[in-house]
Each structure stands twice: as C-alpha cells, then as structure tokens.
Image (tube, rainbow, N blue to C red):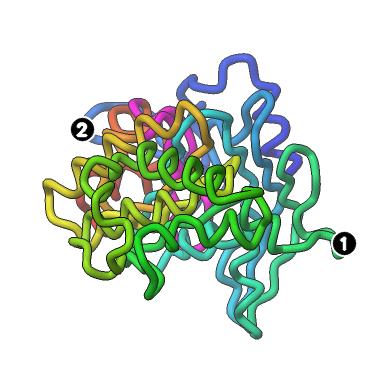
Amino acid sequence: MEAQLKHQDDPTPNRAPAASAATVEDQKTGRILYSRDSRETVGEAFIDEPRMSCRNVDVYYDDKHAIRNVSLDIGRNQVIAMIGPSGCDKSTFLRCLNRMNDTIDICRVTGQIHLDGVDIYDRHIDVVPLRARVGMVFQKPNPFPKSIYDNVAYGPRIHGLAQNKAEMDEVVETSLRRAGLWDEVKDRLDQPGTGLSGGQQQRLCIARTIAVGPEVILMDEPCSALDPIATSIIEDLIDELKQQFSIAIVTHSMQQASRVSQRTAYFHLGDLIEVGETAQIFTNPRHQLTQDYITGRFG
C-alpha cells in the first residue's frame, strides 16, 4: 500500500521504469519493463474523486488466497475493463464490489471498499440497497420467469420506487429505452422474458439493473454467450450507459476491452499487475506480464 500511494503522488506516473533488479529490457523494443517476478501493481491505480475505491483487498476461499492486496479506484462515468487469463480471479474481485461473495460460505474478504466514501463492508450496511446501487449483469442472461414488464418492474417494486401504475409504466419504458430494447418489445410486454433472443435477454437484464437507479454497473463477461451482432449492440449500449453510470466489466476479449473501456486493469493469478489508460495498456504496457498477455504469449 505504501508503495502504491507513493506512486499516486508521482508527478510522472507514465515514465519508463528505471533499470533495476526488478526490471528487464525488452529485446524487440529496447524498452525497460517490470519483470515477470514483480507482483507490485504498476500504473495508475488511483484517480481523483473515484466513485468506488478499493484498498488492500484480499479474498480467501478457505485456505486459498484468491485475491492478494488489490488497491484500485473506479471512476465516475467511465468504463474500466478487467482483463487477464482464465482463473486469475478477476470475477472474484468484481463480485467483491457489491458483496456478491457474501453468498459463498467459505469466502472471506478483507481490506476496504468504499462507495462514495462509505465502507460497503461495514457491519451496519444492508446489502439489499447496496446491490441496487451497485448492480450486476452476469455472463449468461438470467431473466426471471416472468413477463418482460415484470422483469423490469421487479426491482422498483420491491424497493418502493414507484407509487402507482403510471409511475411504474414510466420506469419500465425508460429502462427499456436506455437498454435499447423498447422498440423491439413495446408491443409484447406481457410475454415471457425467457422467450427473447440471447442478446435481447441480456439487454433485458441490463434494463432490469438500471431500473433501480444504480450508481455502478458491474458486468461479468456480458457478451461471452452472444453472437457478434448482439455483442456489438451491447458494446454500443455500454458506451451510452457510461454517460450516466460507472461501469466495471470483466472480459476475456482484449478487442472488446479496447473498444468499450477508458481504463484497463490487468490481473494475473490473483495479483493486480498493471492499471492504466486502455490505449497505453494495449500499446505501451509497463509490465512484462501485461505484454506477455496482450501479445498472446499466454491467456
């Protein structure tokens, strides 16, 4: 943590690392990179006025240390992509952000995660309104076995966000419009949400998430089960949603990360290796492990 905070105050955080025992020279480019043996986060993990801030977060599954000492800020009205090889527990970290890991008996989370300055792991925090403020869209579309209308209305109904039918109708329509789905379903709102195509179901789940007015939307590989056309629609939607929400997305697609995000965080075997602007991560990484991943050496 001390090393990371020192880096936050560094007036030139993007300069190349000085040659040392923890660095190596890339044989192709001649650039100095942090070596594969270094596990300290490099780059810009901290930003001004973050929506969420995570400090020294560790996650354990019984004796397995899944996430190790991760500190990271999530900005307002921007998309941060979390990338890394399979099994690096980036989804585990994502689920910490709205305490979804609470549902796993053997999981233990330490450290601090703040939403607008409030520790979400404080024992007085009610996770139900927390998960309304920090919504989640999962890898596989999971509409409720209800009508399209009731899928979207479910959250506002249990949180008391609409006082009458007219208000609820407005919430449903607005949410479906924001999710880019209204024109496709407005004449069949009473039909089952499970009858929609995969891409439509995922947009319905996004509409359901934004219907309760979240501040942050977490997306765990939201396009992995979709075809390229549906994926493109979801990516365009993410670009629109960032105007109103903070978005953190886990993706195995580096092309998707480069298209939709402004910042990228690279995870490797439970460690946060590098964080920076997306263009910098993909064109000028500072850590050898990041370069190995984006160039296809492993993944």
Crowd class of label 1 (few under 14; some 14 to 19; many from 20; radius 10 Å): few
> Residue 192 location, x and y as percent?
30, 68
Mark number, residue 124: 1
Quadrant in which residue 197 is drawn: bottom left
Q: Which amino acid type corresponds to the residue marked 1 in the rendered image? A: His
- In the rendered view, would you say 139 is above or below 83? below
Residue at the spot 60% in from the left edge and 80% down from the top edge: 104
Crowd class of label 2 (few under 14; some 14 to 19; many from 20; radius 10 Å): few
From the viewer's side, name the closer residue of 98 and 281.
Answer: 98
Quadrant in which residue 47 is drawn: top right
Question: Mark 2 and mark 1 in contact (Cβ < 8 Å)?
Answer: no
> Residue 281 location, x and y as percent?
37, 33
Residue at the spot 65% in from the left edge and 64% down from the top edge: 99
Q: Which amino acid type corresponds to the residue marked 2 in the rendered image? A: Lys
Disc nearer the start of the sequence (1/2): 2
Residue 25 at least partly seen: no
> Residue 283 location, x and y as percent?
28, 28
Name the residue carrying label 2: 28
Image quarter in which the C terminus is found: bottom left
Q: Which residues are magenta?
A: 261-279
From the viewer's side, name the closer residue of 14 and 154.
Answer: 154
268 within the magenta span: yes
Residue 30 at least partly seen: yes
> Residue 258 location, x and y as percent?
29, 35
